[in-house]
Image: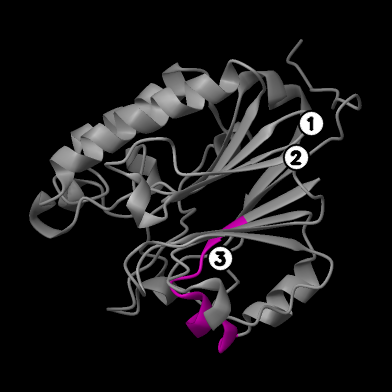
Amino acid sequence: MRFLSWNVNGIRAAQTRGFDDFLAAESPDVLCLQETRALPEQVELSAEGYHAHWNPAARKGYSGVVTLTRREPVGVHFGMGAPEHDGEGRVLTLEFVDHYLVNVYTPNSQRGLARLAYRRRWDADFLSFLRRLEESMPVVVCGDFNVSHKPIDLANPKANARNAGFTDEERAGFDALVAAGFVDTFREFESGGGHYTWWTYRLDARRRNIGWRLDYFLVSASLRPRLKRAWIQPEVHGSDHCPVGIELATAGRQVCLKTNP
């Protein structure tokens, strides 16, 4: 199964920049979108063969996530059962027979770290939510986590040490996900730098590859044997973010992993 995730920075804007062609060409089994900033009735998606599930924010034109799947899930869950968080349309969970799929758009700590205290509560509550899910089935979680985990995950770590997306507090939140057993899939295949998923529109940053890795696929440790590959698609434009993806072997057909002698 091929999973893709993409912060589209407005689904209607992305459609004017080739989103429908992207979907037709890639034809993934699953596509998770973040920052869609629209209601379902405001968008005409060219998504034949997909089931579309929306969780828009209560505030119009803000936040929102959408998940497109070829398989109909057995259950759809909105938010994480926390009134403090669930009005912003940031979490959408699809339940399948052998795993949960969580689409997340993590809150930004904002300029001046005005929302950092809230972000820390979010990180703790989101981890608790994932752990509850994992009690019954493995979890695939993807989206814009709004943090670069390690210095290698952004072009200018020293200059951004106390900026939103690279504070010690936000990085500790991601550390907690990894410590809980969730696997950063991209880093299972690529240990080098220079791989980013977001670039500011200013200063010609994308062409110069001055970016941040903010978008991830994490999987429960029990799914690691099924992980065939993970990638970033910086060549895909249409947003200030680019898509990221993973491929999982079908349940029961695990990948034979290479080990050092």
Task: Tell me which numbered mark, 1 or 3, is placed earlier along the sequence.
Answer: 1
Q: Earlier in the sequence, mark 2 or mark 1?
A: 2
Which residue sits furthest right?
253
- Point out the frontmost of discs 2 and 1: 2
- Say which element carries label 1: loop
- Between 202 and 142, the residue placed more toward the observer is 142
Q: Secondary structure at mark 2?
A: loop
**Residue at x-position 58% and y-position 21%:** 134
Q: Is residue 15 a member of the stretch shown in magenta? A: yes
Q: What's the distance in space between the residues labelled 2 and 3, CA to CA?
A: 33 Å
Q: Amino acid at mark 1?
A: Val
Disc 1 to disc 3, C-alpha distance: 32 Å
Q: Amino acid at mark 2?
A: Val
Name the residue type under label 3. Answer: Pro
Quadrant placement of the N terminus? top right
Q: Is residue 66 left or right of residue 163?
A: right
The x and y percentages for residue 214 are 41, 51
Q: Which residues are magenta?
A: 5-17
Nearest the camera: 146 or 229?
Answer: 146
- For label 3, the SS is loop
Q: Which residue is rendered at x = 69% and y = 25% of the image? A: 224
Q: Which residue is mark 3?
A: 234
Residue occupied by mark 2:
74
- In the rendered image, the vertical position of residue 259 relative to residue 4, given as above or below: above
**Is disc 2 in contact with disc 1, using a CB cutoff of under 8 Å?**
yes
Categorize mark 3 by other alpha carbons within 10 Å: few (<14), some (14-19), many (20+).
some
Q: Position of residue 206 (x, y in %)?
A: 42, 72
Tell me: 15 left or right of 30. Answer: left
Q: Is residue 190 visible?
A: no
Residue 97 bears which disc, if any?
1
- Farthest residue, direction top: 261
Residue 177, horizontal then vertical, whole percent: 43, 26
